Amino acid sequence: MPWYAVRPRDAADPRWPLPGTEEIVLKADDPAAARAKFEEAYPSEPFGSPAVPVPNTGTGSFRGDADSLIVAETGEPASPQD
């Protein structure tokens, strides 16, 4: 299974869940699966508002905004140093 790097198209996007980290690397079958894993793991604001209490569609969510993330195949990430 290949590794994919997921990063925001705009580095200043306030929805990015890990400030100070430019990309998240994860394993997936294809780019669409990598995007889905990212969206599941980092829903940001998992519920909209009291007026729109729909799961996983808050203003901080990347769901439904396919153009906001760049998903590219990459190599295996380095092991963290102790």
Image (cartoon, rainbow, N blue to C red):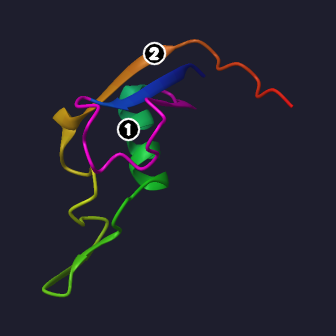
> What is the crowding at mark 2: few (fewer than 14 residues within 10 Å), some, or many (at least 20)?
some
Quadrant containing the C terminus in the rendered view? top right
Residue 7, quarter of the rendered image: top left
Residue 36 in view of the camera = yes
Which of marks 1 and 2 precedes in the sequence?
1
Give the left or right position of residue 9, taking residue 41 as reference.
left
Read off the magenta span.
Answer: 9-29
Mark 1, residue position: 35
Circle 2 sits on which residue? 73
Q: Is residue 7 above or below residue 18?
A: above
Q: Which of 16 and 31 is in front in this view?
A: 16
For the residues marked 2 and 1, what is the alpha-carbon distance in whole angstroms?
12 Å
Q: Is residue 25 magenta?
A: yes
Q: Where is residue 13 in the image (x, y as percent from the top left)?
A: 25, 42
* Residue at the extreme right: 82
Task: Name the residue: 35% across, 68% down.
Answer: 46
- Secondary structure category for the residue under label 1: helix
Q: Residue type at mark 2: give it.
A: Glu
Q: In which quarter of the image is the N terminus?
A: top right
Residue 31, quarter of picture:
top left
Give the residue displayed 44% in from the left and 53% down from the top. 42
- The amino acid marked with disc number 1 is Arg
The tag on residue 7 is: none
